[in-house]
Amino acid sequence: MAAFELIMPKMGESIMEATILKWNKKPGDSIVLDENVLEIATDKVDSEIPSPVAGVLTQVFFNENDVVPIGKVIAIIETNQEGGQKSAPIEERPKSEPIAHTASQPHQTPQISISSENNSNRFYSPLVRTIAQTEDISQAELDKIPGTGQDGRVTKTDIMQYLENRKGTPIVETISVKVESPKVEIIQDNTPSAAKETQTINVADNIEIIEMDRMRKLIADHMVMSKHTSPHVTSFVEVDVTEIVQWRNKIKKSFEQKYNQNITFTPLFIQAVVKALQDYPMVNVSVEGNKIIKKKDMNIGMAAALPSGNLIVPVIKNADTLNLIGLTKAVNDFASRAREQKLKPEEIQGGTFTITNVGTFGNVMGTPIINQPQVAILATGAIKKKPAVIETSYGDVIAIRHMMFLSLSYDHRVVDGALGGSFLRKIADYLESFDTNQLV
């Protein structure tokens, strides 16, 4: 008999911890090779962890909803193998390779301690360090921030709360609502002492309290952080996409028969964005403190809606190296697996620019929030038939055209109006000059 240690696997370069969502097995249960033992979640994606060996689950060291650092032992699986192998260091071990040791070696449950003491050696995530640099927080000041994360780690919520308190407590209007059907009593308190009080609601039959799910909390935190980090500016252009609409209608069936793919407008938008980024590479950047990081890779994120109503952003890596067929296959594959919640952690990381399609919901334009640490995001609106003035050699005429709005939100720290507006106009120019004779 041998005991294998199941460790929390590495889920991506920037991911240092994961939350245990659910144990699919309990101590005493038999496990076959590659059977899912538990489900975990990171701030990027949810994943299932399969067993690298067959055996019996004898011990688990963490409960559901516990946050566990990468590389920690989370369970012991007894196998029928004789003896044991020497454990390899976690850093040298493949993602799902187990550690083996003899059953006679007792394993103590890892202890979690939270400390707010000054410790310059404690770990800080890249996101926390970026926020600290942006807000001119020194290392000494950062070390003094109490951390609520694993082993006293400072989380994004911790540093954002610290910054809020650092600016001083503002005087705000606090409203307490007491519901007694059919009457509603509202009590207002504008005094400074009421600034830290929270809204109190006595629930009645006509009120429903809905707790945010884990992903919605992460999205909420990320959106607030983005607005706090970047001064957002949004520019708009209206684009005539009549030629694209007619071209797509013409080749749609033959394209599907030839490549077994449904061609949507999204790969066409991505193609135009990539060309515009090549013309304006200073939009394909990120910001770290007072430094601008210029990206050579063009990794385009495409926001996709999940069945739960939440959004996820899979990333098409090196989109500038793909032709229209390759982009179509990538878009369809990501959209399908996003709906089925089968995306891998590395497939939603490393984006340098993001596109979100608000036209899917019938919206003509939007003001999207930047996906940090990127500096711009494009929203594509609904395509609508509208009367438009067309310039011809015989004079101006009014015709029915397929029109749409493009909205570009950009980080005004590094993208000014001239750059942002010119980049957006260039995307529109590429769409309006689309080659309808190109071979597909």
Image: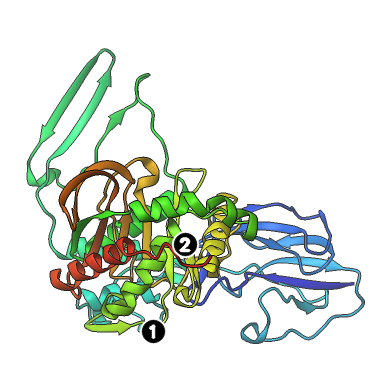
Q: Residue at x 25, y 69 (%)?
A: 426
Residue to which mark 2 is pinned:
43
Residue 214 visible within the image: no
Instruction: Please provide percent x and percent y for residue 60.
Output: 69, 61
Foreground: 329 or 165? 329
Whether residue 357 can be seen here:
yes
Quarter holding residue 354: bottom left
Residue 370's tag is none
Disc 1 designates what residue? 296
Residue at 56% x, 68% y is: 111
Q: Label 2: state its secondary structure.
A: loop
Residue 289 position within the rendered picture, expressed as x and y whole percent measured from the top left: 24, 80
The extreme front residue here reads: 394
Residue 188 percent across, percent down from the top left: 12, 32
Q: Nearer the viewer, mark 1 or mark 2?
A: 1
What is the three-letter code of the residue carrying label 2? Asp
Whole-number angstrom distance, CA of label 1 to CA of label 2: 26 Å
Q: Residue furthest top?
A: 182
Residue at x 42%, y 62% (from the top left corner): 436
Crowding at label 2, few (<14), some or many (≥20) Cα neighbours within 10 Å?
Answer: some
Q: Quadrant of the N terminus?
A: bottom right
Q: Quadrant of residue 241?
A: bottom left
Q: Locate residue 22, reporting x and y percent.
A: 63, 52
